[in-house]
Amino acid sequence: MNWQRRLDSSEQCGSTSDSRVKKGVRKLKLPDEKGYFGSYGGRFVPETVMIALDELEKAFAAACADAGFWSEFELLCHDYAGRPTPLYHARGLSARAHGVNLLLKREDLLHTGAHKINNALGQGLLAKRMGKERIVAETGAGQHGVAVATVCALLKAKCTIYMGEEDVQRQSSNVFRMKLLGAEVCPVSTGSRTLKDAVNESIRDWVTNVRHTHLLLGSVVGPHPYPKIVAEFQSVIGRETKDEMLARYRRLPDYIVACVGGGSNAIGIFRPFVEHESVRLIGVEAAGKGLDSGSHAASLVRGKAGVLHGTKSYLLQDGNGQIASTFSIAPGLDYPGVGPEHAYYKDIGRATYVAVTDDQALEGFKLLCEAEGIIPALESAHAVYYAVRMAEELSPESLVVINLSGRGDKDLGIVSKEIEARQ
Amino acid sequence: MSRITSALSKRKALIAYITVGYPSADVTLEVVPLLADWGCDMVELGIPFSDPLADGTTIQEAGYRALRNGVTPRLCIEMASELRRKVDIPLVFMTYYNPVFNFGLETFCRLSAQSGIDGLIIPDLPPEEGAELEAHTSRQAMDLAYLLAPTSSEERIDLVSQRSSGFIYLVSLTGVTGTRKDLSSDLEVFVGRVRKRTSLPLCIGFGVSTPEQARRAAKIADGVIVGSRLIQLLDKHPFRQLNELVAGLRNALDTS
């Protein structure tokens, strides 16, 4: 399969082209030079790090034009991370979904257990190019933290990971993994003690040590150029999916369903399909204990525009512009903001955003275990549940791709507790 | 001449930062006139924000406490107008962009100006993103002071110099707010780089807490901003230590 990025010089970062699928194509040039997707994005950061963002932007542009950089990235994706990942026709799950063809993009099979490794490898190489000897990152579920710690071990960089105290407890096996890999793990005890506060703390560290430290953001959030860079490294997911669809089914999928916290796995798989209007893109947010419970993380479904962590996007906030505390059973979705590119797709109607509760996600989790022998991450289980539910309304010849962004080993503790609590 | 420009032209200015509503709204109302009496030339009123990513622990904690006390941007505006009746020194709001954006830029600037606020400092709003807010502050004859840091390039110094009004806020170090044992050894070099390229007054903040540090900063700047150390003394009624600190800082500036 063609997992390799085509490196002819005419191809720009982020663009895709295929002569077989020209119909209904809409070309979008995103983001603009100031890092805006429509009215979302930008660069709302302390002056101290403005220069680092300029530097990062230049380094990324230079890397984009350098075939050597991409071949190193692709080699690591292939040999080290295990790309390409399969697009698996889940017949067992399809049988539970009125016979609609459900295809799983198996990012869960990657080294470290989730799509996060794609971006960690890309940015790790970029940091090395920039001569930054230290890497700092935030993590929620710990998947990004593990991916970053892994890449730092591989590339011999110093690594500090900030993780909310709450998440340190919820995802202790990932904390142990990070430490084994040589990372320093700093529990964050401020605010809601989850992902948002870990991001604050990693930005503070970056502001302090910016001259020799790279902030390795794990999602399509943060100040420009992060949303653009992360989307680029993650869009390998969508490119593989597209090639595989065309090779096996001679057509594009009807639906692509992905979970959305910050939104990197979703942007990764959506990106190459955005220009193909026939492909319906669906992002599934965390409805937590219910959209009206006050305990959820559905920024796009229930939030409004605001500025957090350097970017303007949809946010969960109170009437005074204070960021709301969020809740989801899936730590990786437990974030009050979302990438500006998603905010833009929502406003122009290119993607649809829905929300799935904790209980429904657990149902999706169990369903995939039973029907396919695959234990999904709780984050991805949101997408699984919604795709199966959605299938009721679809004709059986529909092709639905679910981005199975991560595996569920890290969640066994949470799930066993939840199952006990419900018995 | 704006109230800020005038205050910065008289003597080396001592600028106090306090978080509105920490430890209580009453303390804010009581302490600002005292700060003015003791020799502060300007007070920055911090509107608390849930995610203050340019602040160290002291101001973070003060902000969380203020939020738990129910402080909102609207209450801060009301308190500013009460304070304006008691003091003549310039008052500026320091906060993050989201509370202002959420309030509505136009309304926020109009009400702030009406309540006697002279300017705004927004540490997560670089000039690249500030054009819209600038339009509203200038319509209300308020200053919008941008920040520069030791990492700022000459191009950025020029940009901030063109766009900042009232003064330029110089962040003394690469880092967040909070007390430090020593000022950065490169401070003079940094301030010199900026001074060469601008005629705006320069005020140094972040990491300035002792009279010795203030004296060194005042030798090269027009004003010195002290925040975290003051905050640490705000809950120690009846402010004897606070009074001593401010008097010491004032004396250091007058003899710098």
Image (spheres, coloured by chain):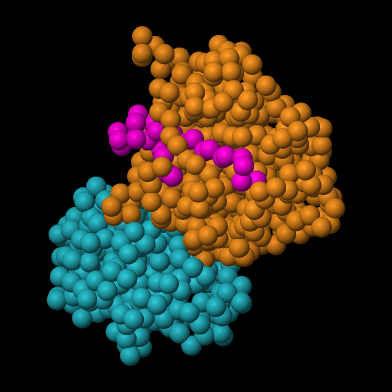
Residue A299: in magenta span: yes
Q: Residue at x 60, y 58 (%)?
A: A31
Q: Establish if A114 lies above or below B222.
A: above
Q: Residue furthest top?
A: A423
Can residue A179 be seen from the camera position used here? Answer: no
Task: Work out whether B44 lies above or below A157.
Answer: below
Residue pictured at 56% horizontal, 40% vertical: A281
Q: Is residue A378 left or right of residue A398?
A: left
* Residue B208 drawn in magenta: no
Residue in the picture at 38% in, 47% down: A303
Display colour for chain A: orange
Q: Quadrant of the N terminus of chain B?
A: bottom left
Q: Residue B33 versus residue A348: which sits nearer the camera? A: A348
Is residue A390 positioned above or below A71 on the image? Answer: above
Q: Which chain is cyan?
A: B
- Report the magenta residues as a range: A276-300
Q: Residue at x 64, y 16 (%)?
A: A91
Query: x, y percentage for residue A143?
Result: 58, 32
Image quadrant where residue B194 sits: bottom right
Q: Nearer the viewer, residue B23 or A78?
A: A78
Name the foreground residue: B99 vs A165.
Answer: B99
